[in-house]
Amino acid sequence: MKTYTSVIFWMRALACLSIVLIHAITTTFIQNDNIGKGTLIRVIQLLLMFSTPLFVFISEFLLAKNYHTSIKKGFFKDKLLFLGIPYVCINIGISYFYFKPKTFTEFLGFLESTMFHGAAVTYFIVIILQFYILHFLFSKYLVN
């Protein structure tokens, strides 16, 4: 089992670096129109898109390895505290500082878009939470 943990560690490191590069490339293209639309850079950006599904795979792999068909008591409470609260706080910040709403109603619209419609980079947290729920619901059946 030690080998798998080591491999997962390196997969996580590769996925982190890939996500940083994706966002760096995207930000560069957004901020600087004079760069042009470099095809090679766009191809590299697309090739790096494996990183978000890789994070989902790593999360499910570690969940299945550590919990098999049952999860510990308070698992979802812990995940909501460690993932849910930052998710809400980051989306509030994105909705206010990035979109710069003029009214509170407009702010709520931006907050709805970022939290429930994937208008922010935090969407992967919801995807991982969905996989936790799916693991909880179906792991007993899939093992058989």
Image: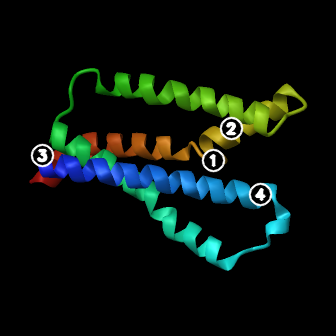
> In what element is the residue under mark 1?
loop
What's the distance in space between the residues labelled 4 and 3, CA to CA? 42 Å
Q: Left of 25 or right of it: where is 144?
A: left
Quarter where residue 69 is shown: top left
Give the foreground label among 3 and 2.
3
Q: Position of residue 29 (x, y in %)?
A: 74, 61
Which residue appears at 21% of the width and 26% of the height? 72
Amino acid identity at mark 1: His
Which residue does the numbered mark 4 point to in the structure image?
30
Query: Residue 117's mark?
Result: 1
Q: Nearer the viewer, mark 4 or mark 1?
A: 4
Marks 1,2: beta carbons within 8 A = yes
Secondary structure, mark 2, is helix
Q: Residues within 10 Å of mark 4 (few under 14, many from 20)?
A: few
Q: Earlier in the sequence, mark 3 or mark 2?
A: 3
Residue identified by numbered label 3: 2
Residue visible at 58% across and 58% down?
Answer: 22
Considering only order in the chain, which callout, 2 or 1, is on the residue closer to the N terminus?
Answer: 2
Labelled disc at residue 112: 2
Q: Nearer the viewer, residue 137 or 19?
A: 19
